[in-house]
């Protein structure tokens, strides 16, 4: 715990509770001076319980005046006389003594000990029970004292922190990183089975191995710089036992570099484990050892960077950051700064004071508070989705738990603050009125006020009169009769292909038909019994000849309509082979333009009567906003995309069938939206057939609560089919 920079008013309504108490720090408490950003702080350590508590220099000056021979009020009055500029306010004294009391760092005189200790005991027990109920996801059970073992291993620990080992460590990380880069595709493929039922046991073993080394890394670094490590045990994280080591003795180190090295030692050790696991994984065949090595890679690299090294969570990265920027108690003070801003600008409390000493520090604290809360929410949501993809019921349970933590608990704390906080005694009515007005305003804004409901997607610009050309017969390019990019007329020959094999096949089919006709004439003359069979063969030969003749005629590619022939995908060099079915471009005629967009039916709610407006901004000309003249919504089951760029294969958002090599056949039901652009546009963009753009569809206005609720249902339906 920590305190000392708390803010408040000069006089406190709760001062009578502590003014006549005679109190002092326990004799087992030791102080360690530290400097952050040219400002002195003091770490208080109880040598009996190994608990730590950080206070500011002003708070330490007041604590030094406390004794069992004087009351708190006398000590405070003396502090005001000696140094009125830096003396704590009554509110700060009340908060400081309350926190120290709950941490069991104070001793009282014999006249007030019985009642105060009993009250302190009850509060401490309630606090422990509350911490147990609220922190049941992370319960720590100490088992043994590893300090003697670490003392014996001190020569080995010093060797591990030597320069030659540091060089070898860097080489190991480089080798492991190169191995992972060389096998990146295999790594990504195997990651899909990380939470598969058959891999959960190995994953847990990998977590145990990584975390044991992680915790011993902290303990070794703490011992290396003179600290003591007396607690080692098991932490129940979501009910799963994991190792932990209490290396909090490093908090009292005077040198910032040493504190940062102890904080980073766990991650440093885990990255070495990840590098070794990468080498094992890359050089073993699929099996138990290979799967275990992959799990260790994930746990010791990705998870430790996302959790342990991230400064937005109160793990190793957080302690490193506080020492690096010289801002102790960053987490607590950021919450207090956000509380001050809420009291100042929302509840309009006149007595609230900022936690920070300057505007820059205040902005940094507020930014960190918002960023840490946002990151925690995103991380928890990501973990829930990650688990729900494999175990839906467990994911739903975690989602309910997150909702309780994010909504119910803060609302309860807010209600309790508004109802019983002594700082609001003189302004409680006005504060409750402001809070009620804010809640009512939020309810009205979110639940009653209709706001624009919009859907965004990618669309394709098309001419209303166009024809796509495909080669109906394969052949070599013999002659280009027209140049792509020029105007052509309906029926005009665009290009001529040559296929000697096709013409030879036609001649062979014609000769075979002539033979069959001759056999038929002979059969009629001789009145033989195989006449019916010959007739069927002649019919089949006629069909084959007709098909080959059609393909030979198709060797001349003809424009179906008049317009501009565009063929960017066509290689026009003479003698090049054009496969049957190959795209030969598009003939774009006149008649206006339209926008075609698609949306998955499970992810949207489009209907003709709901669409109010459709706008598109073409890629490369985003400054021009084109508004559609009319919009039509067509429900398709598993239809065709107007462009492969809208599907997964082309980088779009629509799932396509893996059996379609062109990436045009959708794998899920879709809505197809046709929007006609007006013939007269206020601004004339470059209208090119097939050009992509961002489409915004505006529908009937709805309150935000309805829009969010619908979006959640659609997301769950699409991802989990529920």
Image (cartoon, rainbow, N blue to C red):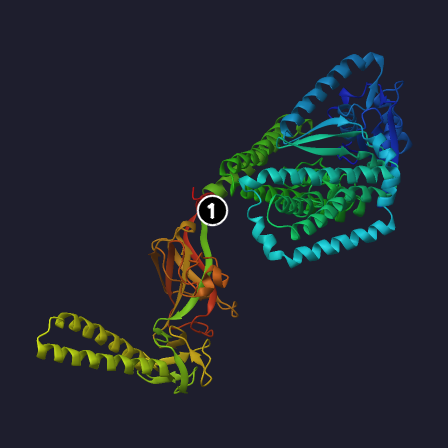
Seen at 48% across and 59% down, the residue is 648
Tell me: 363 left or right of 501.
right
Q: Position of residue 544 (x, y in %)?
A: 26, 75
Viewer-nearest residue: 573 or 26: 573
Q: Quadrant of residue 374?
A: top right
Q: Residues within 10 Å of mark 1 (few under 14, many from 20)?
A: some
Tell me: 464 left or right of 134.
left
The vertical placement of 230 against 264, above or below, is above
Q: Quadrant of residue 154?
A: top right
Seen at 13% across and 80% down, the residue is 522
Q: Position of residue 333 (x, y in %)?
A: 73, 39
Q: Position of residue 289 (x, y in %)?
A: 64, 44
Viewer-nearest residue: 381 or 367: 381
Viewer-nearest residue: 127 or 132: 132
**Count of numbered circles in the view:** 1
**Residue reaching furthest to the right:** 82
- The residue pinned by badge 1 equals 719
The vertical placement of 477 against 20, above or below, is below
The vertical placement of 221 against 653, above or below, is above
State whether residue 29 appears in this view.
Answer: yes
Q: Quadrant of the C terminus?
A: top left
Q: Position of residue 402 (x, y in %)?
A: 57, 36
State whether residue 34 appears in this view.
Answer: no
User: Element under label 1?
Assistant: helix
């Amino acid at each position: 715990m920590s305190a000392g920079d708390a803010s408040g008013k000069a006089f406190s309504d709760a001062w009578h509770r502590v003014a006549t108490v005679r109190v002092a720090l326990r004799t087992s408490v030791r102080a360690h001076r530290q400097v952050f950003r040219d400002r002195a702080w003091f770490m208080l350590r109880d040598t009996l319980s190994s608990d730590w508590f950080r206070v500011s220099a002003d708070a330490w000056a007041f604590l030094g005046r406390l004794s069992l021979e004087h009351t708190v009020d006398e000590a405070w009055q003396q502090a005001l006389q000696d140094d009125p500029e830096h003396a704590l306010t009554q509110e700060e004294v009340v908060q400081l003594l309350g926190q120290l009391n709950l941490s069991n760092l104070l001793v009282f005189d014999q006249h007030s000990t019985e009642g105060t200790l009993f009250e302190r005991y009850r509060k401490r027990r309630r606090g422990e029970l509350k911490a147990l109920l609220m922190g049941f996801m992370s319960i720590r059970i100490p088992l043994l004292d590893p300090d003697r073992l670490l003392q014996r291993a001190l020569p080995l620990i010093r060797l591990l922190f030597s320069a030659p080992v540091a060089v070898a460590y860097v080489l190991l990380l480089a080798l492991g990183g190169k191995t992972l880069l060389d096998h990146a595709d295999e790594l990504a493929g195997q990651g899909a089975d990380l939470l598969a039922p058959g891999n959960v046991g190995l994953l847990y073993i990998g977590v145990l191995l990584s975390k044991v080394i992680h915790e011993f890394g902290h303990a070794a670094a703490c011992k290396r710089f003179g600290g003591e490590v007396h607690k080692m045990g098991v932490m129940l994280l979501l009910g799963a036992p994991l190792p932990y080591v209490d290396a909090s003795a490093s908090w009292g180190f005077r040198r910032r570099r040493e504190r940062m090295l102890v904080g980073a030692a766990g991650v440093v050790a885990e990255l070495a484990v990840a590098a070794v696991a990468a080498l094992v994984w890359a050089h073993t065949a699929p099996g138990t050892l290979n799967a275990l090595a992959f799990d260790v890679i994930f746990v010791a690299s990705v998870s430790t960077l996302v959790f342990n090294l991230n400064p937005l969570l109160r793990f190793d990265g957080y302690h490193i950051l506080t020492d690096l920027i010289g801002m102790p108690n960053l987490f607590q003070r950021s919450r207090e700064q956000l509380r001050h801003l809420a009291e100042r600008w929302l509840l309009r409390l006149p007595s609230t004071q900022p936690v920070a000493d300057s505007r820059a520090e205040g902005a940094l604290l507020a930014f960190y508070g918002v960023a840490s809360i946002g990151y925690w929410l995103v991380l928890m949501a990501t973990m829930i989705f990650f688990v729900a993809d494999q175990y839906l019921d467990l994911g739903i349970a975690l989602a309910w738990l997150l909702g309780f933590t994010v909504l119910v608990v803060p609302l309860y704390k807010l209600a309790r603050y508004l109802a019983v906080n002594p700082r609001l005694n003189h302004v409680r009515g006005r504060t409750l009125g402001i809070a009620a007005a804010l809640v009512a305003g939020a309810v009205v804004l979110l639940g009653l006020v209709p706001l624009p409901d919009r859907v965004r997607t990618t669309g394709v610009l098309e001419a209303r009169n166009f024809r796509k050309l495909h080669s109906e017969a394969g052949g070599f390019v013999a002659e280009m009769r027209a140049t792509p990019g020029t105007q052509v007329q309906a029926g005009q020959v665009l290009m001529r292909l040559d296929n000697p094999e096709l013409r030879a096949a036609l001649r062979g089919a014609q000769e075979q038909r002539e033979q069959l006709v001759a056999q038929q004439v002979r059969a009629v003359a001789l009145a033989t019994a195989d006449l019916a069979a010959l007739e069927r063969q002649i019919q089949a030969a006629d069909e084959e000849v007709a098909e080959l003749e059609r393909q030979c005629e198709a060797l001349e590619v003809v424009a179906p309509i008049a317009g501009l022939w565009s063929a960017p995908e066509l290689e026009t060099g003479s003698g090049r082979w054009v496969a049957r079915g190959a795209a030969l471009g598009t003939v774009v005629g006149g008649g206006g333009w339209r926008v075609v967009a698609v949306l998955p039916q499970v992810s949207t709610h489009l209907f003709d009567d709901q669409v109010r407006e459709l706008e598109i901004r073409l890629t490369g000309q985003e400054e021009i906003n084109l508004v559609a003249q009319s919009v039509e919504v067509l429900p398709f089951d598993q239809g065709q995309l107007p462009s492969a760029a809208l599907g997964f294969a082309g980088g779009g958002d629509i799932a396509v069938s893996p059996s379609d090599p062109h990436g045009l056949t959708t794998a899920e039901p879709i809505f197809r939206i046709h929007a006609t652009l007006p013939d007269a546009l206020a601004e004339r963009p470059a209208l090119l057939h097939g050009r992509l753009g961002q489409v915004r569809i505006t529908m009937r206005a709805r309150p935000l609560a309805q829009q969010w609720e619908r979006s959640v249902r659609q997301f769950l339906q699409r991802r989990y089919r529920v």
